[in-house]
Image: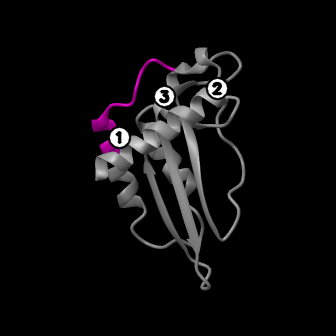
Amino acid sequence: MKIDKFLEQVKIAEASLSGTFPKESISKVHLKPNVRNRLNKAIGKLLAPYFDKIPLQPLLDILEKDGLVAVQEDATEWEGFLMGRNQQIYFHLGWKDTMDSEKRFMIVPNAMLALSWYKFETGRYEITSYVT
């Protein structure tokens, strides 16, 4: 059952890539399963407690250690705001060492960073994140 959910997420990620990025900006290099597992273990350790704010930079630092960067629609490094009490978003990932002269990255075709949060009445956040 778990593998079916994973395969469904991969199909969603690949479908969104084909409509968002030019074909030539999608890398032929895929994220290996052992790297994905290592990333998800590190993210799980980071997100064990509740938070006063969303720990986005520590999440991005975990990705960077394995040569990944969160990217936006134009394949440049993601920058923006996280808003709302309850939200779920997905970040496309790029290979950090592929940045071109226009600061765009080659897109990882089989991985995205999922991030969701819930803000309690106390003002603290429960955060869930993983690499799909």
Residue contact at pointers 3 and 2, CB within 8 angstroms: no
Circle 2 residue: 21
* Total labels drawn: 3
**Dot 3, how many residues are within 10 Å of its Cα: few (below 14), some (14-19), or many (20+)?**
many
| Magenta span includes 117 | no
- Left or right of residue 13: residue 104: right
Among the two numbered marks 3 and 2 on one chain, the one whose residue lies closer to the N terminus: 2
Circle 1 residue: 36
Three-letter residue code for mark 2: Phe
Q: Which residues are magenta?
A: 27-39
Note whether 11 is above or below 45 in the view shown.
above
Give the residue displayed 35% in from the left and 40% down from the top. 36
Note whether 39 is above or below 104 in the view shown.
below
* Residue placed most toward the observer, 18 or 104: 18
**Rendered image quadrant of residue 15:** top right
Could you say where residue 114 lies in the image, as x and y percent from the top left? 51, 50
Give the residue displayed 59% in from the left and 35% down from the top. 16
Three-letter residue code for mark 1: Arg
- CA gap between label 1 and label 2 equals 22 Å
**Dot 1, how many residues are within 10 Å of its Cα: few (below 14), some (14-19), or many (20+)?**
some
Element type at mark 2:
loop
- Name the mark nearer the viewer: 1 or 2: 2
Give the residue displayed 59% in from the left and 27% down from the top. 18
Circle 3 residue: 109
Residue contact at pointers 1 and 2, CB within 8 angstroms: no
Could you say where residue 17 lies in the image, as x and y percent from the top left? 58, 31
